Amino acid sequence: MAYEDQFRDEPCFVISIAARMVGLHAQTVRYYERVVLIWPSRSGGRQRLYSQTDIDRLRRIKTFTDEMGMNLAGAEVALKLVERIEELELEVKKLSDEVIRLQKPTKAGTR
């Protein structure tokens, strides 16, 4: 799993494949880029390249708009909230781990 995670941000899908993976039209994906909901990498020839992280973001946008009935402004706000929640969850995990580490007794039996 850690091996897969290290390549999540590696751009590797062209727009036609990315759109097909998510179930969107390529023009819709281009529109999402124009309104800055997605920002794919570019190859040396300026071809859009999408990472797995980009694909996940496109799926989330599609869920918000198609299944939840949000407009793109609402989807943008929801994406920002989800990202902030994920950041806070990571911070809580780090702090919890630090508390556990600090509560462990030392080898000498003292804290």
Image (tube, grey):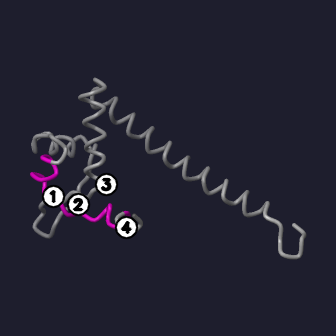
Dots 1, 3 in contact, CB < 8 A: no
Picture residue at 20% right of the left edge, 63% below the top: 12
How far apart marks 1 and 2 lie (CA) works out to 6 Å
Cα–Cα span, label 2 and label 3: 11 Å
> Residue 57: horizontal and vertical position, in percent?
30, 46
Contact check, label 2 and label 3, Cβ < 8 Å: no
Q: Which three-letter amino acid code belongs to the residue tagged 2?
A: Ser
- Quarter where residue 62 is shown: top left
Q: Secondary structure at mark 2?
A: strand
Report the residue at 48% width, 44% height from top. 84
Categorize mark 4 by other alpha carbons within 10 Å: few (<14), some (14-19), many (20+).
few
Q: Quadrant of residue 9?
A: bottom left
Q: Which mark is residue 6?
A: 4
Distance in Å between CA atoms under marks 3 and 4: 11 Å
Residue type marked 4:
Gln
- Give residue 64's position: percent from left, percent from top: 30, 32
Start-end of magenta stretch: 5-20
Q: Is residue 101 left or right of residue 1?
A: right
Mark 1 → mark 3, Cα distance in angstroms: 14 Å
Task: State the SS at label 3.
Answer: helix
Q: Nearer the viewer, residue 29 or 94?
A: 94
Sequence-wise, the earlier of marks 3 and 4 is 4
The residue wearing badge 2 is 41
- Pair 1/4: label in front: 4
Q: Which residue is mark 3?
A: 53
Give neighbour class at mark 1: few <14, some 14-19, many 20+ (Cα, 10 Å): some
On the image, numbered disc 1 is attached to which residue?
48
Q: Taking 12 as reference, is 22 above or below it? A: above
Label located before the other in sequence (1 or 4): 4
Q: Is residue 52 magenta?
A: no
Q: Which numbered disc, 1 or 3, marks the residue closer to the eye?
A: 3
Query: Residue 18 lies in magenta, yes or no?
Result: yes
